[in-house]
Amino acid sequence: MSIAPISNDNIKVGYISEDDGYVKGRSIAQANAYEALNPDTTFIFLNGDNKVEYLSIDEVNQLTSKNLLRSDPCKVGPQPCPPPTLEFYGGGGIGAEANPVVDRQGNLLAADLVNGGFGYETPPFVTVVDPCRNGNGAVLNTEIRDGIVIRIIVNETGTGYLPPKTTSPQYPAILQLSEIRVDEPGINYDCGKDEIIIEPANGTQLSYTCEPFGKISGVKVLRAGNFTELPDIRMKTTTGINASFTPVFNVVRDPLPVEPVAKDIVQVFDLVGLNINGYVGGKEYYGNVYFKNGAKFAGTSTKSGTNIRVFESREASISGVNVPVARTARTDEALTTRSATTTDVITAEPDVVEPTTAPAPAPSPSPSPSPAPAPSPAPAPSPAPSPSPPPSPPPSGGGGYGGY
Protein backbone atom coordinates (compact mmCIF):
# COMPACT_ATOMS: atom_id res chain seq x y z
CA MET A 1 0.00 0.00 0.00
CA SER A 2 1.54 3.31 -1.07
CA ILE A 3 1.41 6.45 1.07
CA ALA A 4 0.34 9.64 -0.66
CA PRO A 5 3.06 12.30 -0.55
CA ILE A 6 2.50 15.40 1.54
CA SER A 7 1.47 18.32 -0.65
CA ASN A 8 0.31 21.87 -0.19
CA ASP A 9 -3.25 20.57 -0.45
CA ASN A 10 -2.73 19.04 3.01
CA ILE A 11 -2.14 22.44 4.58
CA LYS A 12 -5.08 23.44 6.74
CA VAL A 13 -5.47 26.46 8.98
CA GLY A 14 -8.09 27.77 11.35
CA TYR A 15 -9.26 31.06 12.80
CA ILE A 16 -11.44 32.44 15.58
CA SER A 17 -14.86 33.65 14.46
CA GLU A 18 -17.05 35.80 16.71
CA ASP A 19 -20.08 33.90 15.43
CA ASP A 20 -18.75 30.36 15.04
CA GLY A 21 -15.90 30.18 17.55
CA TYR A 22 -12.83 28.22 16.51
CA VAL A 23 -13.11 27.26 12.83
CA LYS A 24 -10.52 24.73 11.62
CA GLY A 25 -9.67 22.68 8.57
CA ARG A 26 -9.65 25.54 6.05
CA SER A 27 -7.48 25.43 2.93
CA ILE A 28 -5.19 28.26 1.88
CA ALA A 29 -7.73 29.33 -0.74
CA GLN A 30 -10.51 29.38 1.84
CA ALA A 31 -8.28 31.38 4.20
CA ASN A 32 -7.73 34.01 1.49
CA ALA A 33 -11.46 34.21 0.84
CA TYR A 34 -12.13 34.72 4.55
CA GLU A 35 -9.37 37.34 4.80
CA ALA A 36 -10.93 39.31 1.95
CA LEU A 37 -14.11 39.68 4.01
CA ASN A 38 -12.35 39.96 7.40
CA PRO A 39 -9.07 41.88 6.99
CA ASP A 40 -6.22 41.34 9.46
CA THR A 41 -7.46 37.93 10.60
CA THR A 42 -4.99 35.90 12.67
CA PHE A 43 -4.88 32.33 11.37
CA ILE A 44 -3.97 29.29 13.45
CA PHE A 45 -1.67 26.59 12.04
CA LEU A 46 -0.47 23.33 13.61
CA ASN A 47 3.00 22.57 12.26
CA GLY A 48 4.84 19.28 11.92
CA ASP A 49 6.22 19.58 15.46
CA ASN A 50 2.65 19.76 16.77
CA LYS A 51 3.20 23.39 17.76
CA VAL A 52 0.61 26.10 17.24
CA GLU A 53 1.62 29.07 15.09
CA TYR A 54 -0.36 32.31 14.72
CA LEU A 55 -0.01 33.70 11.20
CA SER A 56 -1.10 36.59 9.03
CA ILE A 57 -2.58 35.84 5.61
CA ASP A 58 0.79 36.64 4.00
CA GLU A 59 2.44 34.02 6.23
CA VAL A 60 -0.31 31.55 5.42
CA ASN A 61 0.37 31.99 1.70
CA GLN A 62 4.04 31.20 2.33
CA LEU A 63 3.31 27.81 3.92
CA THR A 64 4.54 24.75 2.04
CA SER A 65 4.47 21.01 2.60
CA LYS A 66 7.78 21.34 4.49
CA ASN A 67 5.88 23.03 7.31
CA LEU A 68 3.99 19.78 7.86
CA LEU A 69 7.21 17.84 8.55
CA ARG A 70 9.08 17.55 11.81
CA SER A 71 11.99 19.92 12.16
CA ASP A 72 14.10 17.27 13.91
CA PRO A 73 14.59 13.80 12.48
CA CYS A 74 13.17 10.85 14.37
CA LYS A 75 15.58 9.57 17.01
CA VAL A 76 16.58 5.93 16.73
CA GLY A 77 18.05 3.63 19.34
CA PRO A 78 17.56 3.68 23.11
CA GLN A 79 16.61 7.04 24.59
CA PRO A 80 16.49 8.12 28.26
CA CYS A 81 13.05 8.28 29.79
CA PRO A 82 11.69 11.83 29.47
CA PRO A 83 9.59 13.63 32.09
CA PRO A 84 5.81 13.68 31.74
CA THR A 85 4.20 16.26 29.49
CA LEU A 86 0.66 17.62 29.41
CA GLU A 87 -1.49 17.41 26.29
CA PHE A 88 -4.86 19.12 25.87
CA TYR A 89 -7.56 17.69 23.66
CA GLY A 90 -11.26 18.17 23.02
CA GLY A 91 -13.33 21.17 23.94
CA GLY A 92 -13.43 22.56 20.40
CA GLY A 93 -10.38 24.81 20.81
CA ILE A 94 -6.63 24.77 20.32
CA GLY A 95 -3.37 26.07 21.75
CA ALA A 96 -3.51 25.46 25.53
CA GLU A 97 -0.09 24.62 27.00
CA ALA A 98 1.18 23.98 30.51
CA ASN A 99 4.27 22.74 32.36
CA PRO A 100 3.84 20.01 35.01
CA VAL A 101 5.30 20.55 38.49
CA VAL A 102 6.62 17.27 39.94
CA ASP A 103 8.02 17.00 43.48
CA ARG A 104 10.89 14.81 44.66
CA GLN A 105 8.49 11.97 45.52
CA GLY A 106 7.15 11.83 41.96
CA ASN A 107 3.80 13.50 42.70
CA LEU A 108 2.39 15.82 40.04
CA LEU A 109 1.49 18.71 42.33
CA ALA A 110 0.38 21.39 39.90
CA ALA A 111 0.46 22.64 36.33
CA ASP A 112 1.76 26.06 35.33
CA LEU A 113 -0.53 27.36 32.59
CA VAL A 114 1.69 28.92 29.91
CA ASN A 115 -0.89 29.48 27.17
CA GLY A 116 -4.67 29.47 27.58
CA GLY A 117 -5.31 28.77 23.90
CA PHE A 118 -8.36 29.87 21.90
CA GLY A 119 -11.87 28.84 21.00
CA TYR A 120 -12.73 26.32 23.71
CA GLU A 121 -16.45 25.70 23.97
CA THR A 122 -16.14 23.22 26.84
CA PRO A 123 -13.23 22.60 29.23
CA PRO A 124 -10.64 20.48 27.40
CA PHE A 125 -9.32 17.22 28.80
CA VAL A 126 -5.71 16.97 29.94
CA THR A 127 -3.64 13.83 29.44
CA VAL A 128 -0.39 13.23 31.31
CA VAL A 129 1.90 11.65 28.72
CA ASP A 130 4.62 9.49 30.30
CA PRO A 131 6.30 7.48 27.50
CA CYS A 132 8.18 5.12 29.85
CA ARG A 133 5.14 4.63 32.09
CA ASN A 134 7.08 5.31 35.26
CA GLY A 135 4.27 7.36 36.72
CA ASN A 136 0.51 6.95 36.71
CA GLY A 137 -2.70 8.03 38.35
CA ALA A 138 -2.64 11.81 37.87
CA VAL A 139 -6.04 13.30 37.04
CA LEU A 140 -6.35 16.92 35.89
CA ASN A 141 -9.34 19.11 35.05
CA THR A 142 -9.55 22.52 33.41
CA GLU A 143 -11.68 25.62 33.73
CA ILE A 144 -12.37 28.02 30.85
CA ARG A 145 -13.64 31.57 30.40
CA ASP A 146 -14.45 33.20 27.06
CA GLY A 147 -12.95 30.27 25.17
CA ILE A 148 -9.62 30.38 27.05
CA VAL A 149 -8.29 27.93 29.63
CA ILE A 150 -7.82 29.94 32.84
CA ARG A 151 -7.06 27.24 35.40
CA ILE A 152 -5.82 23.66 35.74
CA ILE A 153 -6.89 21.62 38.77
CA VAL A 154 -4.91 18.54 39.81
CA ASN A 155 -7.56 16.30 41.34
CA GLU A 156 -5.20 13.32 41.72
CA THR A 157 -1.44 13.82 41.91
CA GLY A 158 -0.54 10.28 40.87
CA THR A 159 2.88 8.91 41.73
CA GLY A 160 6.17 7.80 40.22
CA TYR A 161 6.61 10.61 37.68
CA LEU A 162 10.18 11.49 36.77
CA PRO A 163 11.51 15.04 36.87
CA PRO A 164 13.53 16.19 33.86
CA LYS A 165 17.30 16.29 33.95
CA THR A 166 18.81 19.27 35.70
CA THR A 167 20.23 20.39 32.36
CA SER A 168 16.71 21.03 31.06
CA PRO A 169 15.47 24.64 30.86
CA GLN A 170 13.80 25.63 34.11
CA TYR A 171 12.46 28.63 35.99
CA PRO A 172 11.69 29.34 39.65
CA ALA A 173 8.17 29.34 41.07
CA ILE A 174 6.27 29.13 44.33
CA LEU A 175 3.39 26.72 44.91
CA GLN A 176 0.93 28.69 47.01
CA LEU A 177 -2.01 26.82 48.53
CA SER A 178 -5.16 28.38 47.09
CA GLU A 179 -7.91 25.90 47.89
CA ILE A 180 -8.66 22.58 49.57
CA ARG A 181 -11.35 20.49 47.94
CA VAL A 182 -13.41 17.95 49.84
CA ASP A 183 -13.25 14.68 47.90
CA GLU A 184 -15.21 12.66 50.45
CA PRO A 185 -17.21 14.32 53.27
CA GLY A 186 -16.93 11.34 55.58
CA ILE A 187 -19.35 10.97 58.46
CA ASN A 188 -19.76 11.30 62.22
CA TYR A 189 -17.26 14.12 62.81
CA ASP A 190 -17.66 16.29 65.91
CA CYS A 191 -17.61 19.73 64.31
CA GLY A 192 -17.24 21.56 67.57
CA LYS A 193 -14.24 19.53 68.67
CA ASP A 194 -12.42 17.83 65.80
CA GLU A 195 -9.52 19.62 64.14
CA ILE A 196 -8.36 19.68 60.52
CA ILE A 197 -4.61 19.06 60.23
CA ILE A 198 -2.22 19.83 57.36
CA GLU A 199 1.38 18.59 57.55
CA PRO A 200 3.70 20.22 56.86
CA ALA A 201 1.69 23.35 57.59
CA ASN A 202 4.24 25.91 56.34
CA GLY A 203 2.23 28.64 58.02
CA THR A 204 -1.13 27.49 56.63
CA GLN A 205 -4.25 28.00 58.73
CA LEU A 206 -7.52 26.20 57.93
CA SER A 207 -11.10 26.04 59.08
CA TYR A 208 -13.95 23.77 58.03
CA THR A 209 -17.75 23.54 58.00
CA CYS A 210 -20.05 20.58 58.60
CA GLU A 211 -23.36 19.24 57.39
CA PRO A 212 -25.79 17.08 59.35
CA PHE A 213 -24.47 13.68 60.49
CA GLY A 214 -21.00 15.12 60.91
CA LYS A 215 -20.11 15.37 57.21
CA ILE A 216 -17.36 17.81 56.18
CA SER A 217 -18.94 20.19 53.65
CA GLY A 218 -16.09 22.61 53.00
CA VAL A 219 -12.63 23.79 53.97
CA LYS A 220 -11.55 27.43 54.04
CA VAL A 221 -7.94 28.56 53.69
CA LEU A 222 -7.49 31.30 56.29
CA ARG A 223 -3.79 31.70 55.64
CA ALA A 224 -1.98 30.22 52.64
CA GLY A 225 1.45 28.64 52.92
CA ASN A 226 3.99 27.76 50.24
CA PHE A 227 4.79 24.15 49.44
CA THR A 228 7.50 22.14 47.70
CA GLU A 229 5.90 18.74 48.29
CA LEU A 230 2.45 17.24 48.75
CA PRO A 231 1.06 17.89 52.26
CA ASP A 232 -0.99 15.41 54.26
CA ILE A 233 -4.48 16.73 55.08
CA ARG A 234 -6.65 14.84 57.59
CA MET A 235 -9.13 15.24 60.42
CA LYS A 236 -7.94 14.79 64.00
CA THR A 237 -10.87 12.89 65.44
CA THR A 238 -11.97 9.99 67.61
CA THR A 239 -15.39 9.55 66.03
CA GLY A 240 -15.38 10.54 62.34
CA ILE A 241 -14.22 8.45 59.38
CA ASN A 242 -13.51 8.57 55.63
CA ALA A 243 -13.12 12.30 54.93
CA SER A 244 -10.52 13.00 52.23
CA PHE A 245 -9.14 16.21 50.75
CA THR A 246 -7.18 17.49 47.75
CA PRO A 247 -4.99 20.61 47.93
CA VAL A 248 -5.03 23.02 44.97
CA PHE A 249 -1.99 25.21 44.30
CA ASN A 250 -1.43 28.46 42.43
CA VAL A 251 1.86 28.54 40.55
CA VAL A 252 3.43 31.93 41.29
CA ARG A 253 5.99 32.21 38.53
CA ASP A 254 9.23 34.11 39.20
CA PRO A 255 8.57 35.20 42.78
CA LEU A 256 10.39 38.43 43.64
CA PRO A 257 12.52 38.90 45.57
CA VAL A 258 13.74 35.29 45.69
CA GLU A 259 16.20 35.42 48.61
CA PRO A 260 13.76 35.70 51.57
CA VAL A 261 11.77 32.68 50.39
CA ALA A 262 14.52 30.52 48.89
CA LYS A 263 13.40 27.46 50.87
CA ASP A 264 9.95 27.70 49.24
CA ILE A 265 11.20 27.82 45.65
CA VAL A 266 10.49 24.95 43.29
CA GLN A 267 12.09 24.65 39.88
CA VAL A 268 9.58 24.18 37.06
CA PHE A 269 11.05 22.49 34.02
CA ASP A 270 10.11 24.31 30.85
CA LEU A 271 8.81 21.62 28.50
CA VAL A 272 6.72 23.86 26.22
CA GLY A 273 9.13 26.71 25.54
CA LEU A 274 8.08 29.56 27.82
CA ASN A 275 8.96 33.02 26.56
CA ILE A 276 11.29 35.24 28.57
CA ASN A 277 9.62 38.53 29.50
CA GLY A 278 12.87 40.26 30.38
CA TYR A 279 15.63 40.23 33.00
CA VAL A 280 15.81 41.13 36.68
CA GLY A 281 19.14 41.27 38.50
CA GLY A 282 20.92 39.41 35.73
CA LYS A 283 18.42 36.52 35.69
CA GLU A 284 15.73 35.59 33.17
CA TYR A 285 12.24 36.70 34.17
CA TYR A 286 9.22 34.69 32.99
CA GLY A 287 6.50 36.21 35.13
CA ASN A 288 3.77 38.77 34.62
CA VAL A 289 4.67 42.32 33.63
CA TYR A 290 2.87 45.65 33.40
CA PHE A 291 3.83 48.97 31.83
CA LYS A 292 4.03 52.35 33.55
CA ASN A 293 5.13 55.45 31.64
CA GLY A 294 6.69 53.26 28.99
CA ALA A 295 8.75 51.20 31.47
CA LYS A 296 8.19 47.54 32.31
CA PHE A 297 7.72 46.25 35.87
CA ALA A 298 7.13 42.87 37.50
CA GLY A 299 3.50 42.23 38.44
CA THR A 300 0.06 42.57 36.94
CA SER A 301 -0.90 46.22 37.53
CA THR A 302 0.13 49.42 39.26
CA LYS A 303 -2.08 48.43 42.21
CA SER A 304 -1.17 44.77 42.68
CA GLY A 305 2.25 44.76 41.00
CA THR A 306 5.69 45.66 42.28
CA ASN A 307 8.15 48.47 41.74
CA ILE A 308 10.73 45.98 40.48
CA ARG A 309 11.97 46.98 37.04
CA VAL A 310 12.15 44.40 34.25
CA PHE A 311 14.84 45.13 31.67
CA GLU A 312 15.18 44.09 28.06
CA SER A 313 18.68 42.59 28.41
CA ARG A 314 20.73 40.85 31.06
CA GLU A 315 23.35 43.63 30.97
CA ALA A 316 20.76 46.34 31.48
CA SER A 317 19.26 44.51 34.47
CA ILE A 318 22.67 44.53 36.14
CA SER A 319 23.63 48.11 35.33
CA GLY A 320 20.15 49.53 35.83
CA VAL A 321 20.30 51.35 32.48
CA ASN A 322 17.81 50.18 29.89
CA VAL A 323 18.18 50.56 26.15
CA PRO A 324 14.95 51.72 24.44
CA VAL A 325 13.43 49.12 22.12
CA ALA A 326 10.53 49.19 19.70
CA ARG A 327 7.66 48.15 21.94
CA THR A 328 4.10 49.27 22.56
CA ALA A 329 3.96 51.27 25.76
CA ARG A 330 0.89 50.47 27.81
CA THR A 331 0.51 52.99 30.60
CA ASP A 332 -0.86 51.44 33.79
CA GLU A 333 -1.94 48.37 31.87
CA ALA A 334 -1.20 44.80 32.88
CA LEU A 335 0.30 42.32 30.46
CA THR A 336 -0.04 38.85 31.97
CA THR A 337 1.34 35.50 30.96
CA ARG A 338 -1.16 33.69 33.12
CA SER A 339 -4.90 34.11 33.18
CA ALA A 340 -5.30 34.30 36.96
CA THR A 341 -3.58 37.00 38.98
CA THR A 342 -1.76 36.14 42.19
CA THR A 343 -1.55 37.87 45.53
CA ASP A 344 1.81 39.27 46.57
CA VAL A 345 3.02 37.42 49.68
CA ILE A 346 6.49 38.95 49.93
CA THR A 347 7.76 42.46 49.75
CA ALA A 348 11.18 44.02 49.72
CA GLU A 349 12.82 47.21 48.67
CA PRO A 350 13.68 46.86 44.99
CA ASP A 351 17.06 47.78 43.67
CA VAL A 352 15.47 50.06 41.07
CA VAL A 353 12.23 51.85 41.80
CA GLU A 354 11.79 54.24 38.96
CA PRO A 355 13.13 54.03 35.41
CA THR A 356 16.38 55.89 35.12
CA THR A 357 18.89 56.76 32.47
CA ALA A 358 22.63 56.99 32.82
CA PRO A 359 23.57 60.51 33.91
CA ALA A 360 25.43 62.38 31.23
CA PRO A 361 28.85 63.73 32.20
CA ALA A 362 28.82 67.30 33.46
CA PRO A 363 29.75 69.67 30.65
CA SER A 364 33.24 71.10 30.96
CA PRO A 365 33.49 74.90 30.91
CA SER A 366 34.02 76.30 27.47
CA PRO A 367 37.35 78.09 26.96
CA SER A 368 37.27 81.84 26.62
CA PRO A 369 37.26 82.86 22.98
CA SER A 370 40.48 84.42 21.72
CA PRO A 371 40.30 88.08 20.59
CA ALA A 372 39.41 88.19 16.96
CA PRO A 373 41.46 90.48 14.69
CA ALA A 374 38.41 91.39 12.71
CA PRO A 375 35.42 93.13 14.22
CA SER A 376 33.18 90.23 13.13
CA PRO A 377 31.73 88.31 16.11
CA ALA A 378 33.43 85.10 17.21
CA PRO A 379 31.59 81.89 16.41
CA ALA A 380 29.36 80.63 19.20
CA PRO A 381 30.84 77.73 21.17
CA SER A 382 29.32 74.30 20.55
CA PRO A 383 26.45 73.55 22.92
CA ALA A 384 27.42 71.36 25.87
CA PRO A 385 25.85 67.90 25.98
CA SER A 386 22.76 67.67 28.09
CA PRO A 387 21.29 64.60 29.80
CA SER A 388 19.17 62.44 27.54
CA PRO A 389 15.47 62.61 28.33
CA PRO A 390 13.69 59.39 29.41
CA PRO A 391 12.57 57.32 26.45
CA SER A 392 9.07 58.21 25.41
CA PRO A 393 6.61 55.45 24.50
CA PRO A 394 6.80 54.59 20.81
CA PRO A 395 3.57 55.03 18.92
CA SER A 396 3.24 51.40 17.95
CA GLY A 397 5.07 48.12 17.78
CA GLY A 398 5.12 44.61 19.13
CA GLY A 399 3.65 44.17 22.58
CA GLY A 400 4.89 41.87 25.32
CA TYR A 401 4.34 38.15 25.63
CA GLY A 402 1.09 36.44 26.33
CA GLY A 403 -1.64 38.52 24.67
CA TYR A 404 -4.33 36.71 22.80
Image (cartoon, grey):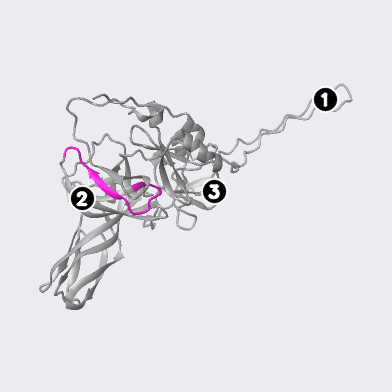
In this rendered view, identify the residue nearer to me: 261 or 124. Answer: 124
Query: Distance from label 2 to label 1 (Cα)?
Result: 89 Å
Give the image quarter of residue 168. Answer: top left
Q: Residue at horizontal 10%, vertical 74%? A: 239
Q: Is residue 221 left or right of residue 14?
A: left
Mark 1 packing: few (<14 Cα in 10 Å), some, or many (20+)?
few
Inspect the image, locate mark 1, and give the three-letter code of the amino acid beneath it. Pro
- Tell me the residue that label 3 is attached to: 330
Give the image quarter of residue 235. Answer: bottom left
Secondary element at tag 1? loop
Secondary element at tag 3? loop
Pick whichever of labels 3 and 1 is earlier in the sequence. Answer: 3
Pick whichever of labels 2 and 3 is earlier in the sequence. Answer: 2
Q: Which mark is residue 371?
A: 1
Query: Distance from label 3 to label 1 (Cα)?
Result: 55 Å
- Tell me the residue that label 2 is attached to: 138
Query: Distance from label 2 to label 3 (Cα)?
Result: 40 Å
Q: Residue at horizontal 85%, vertical 28%? A: 377
Range of the magenta residues?
A: 113-132
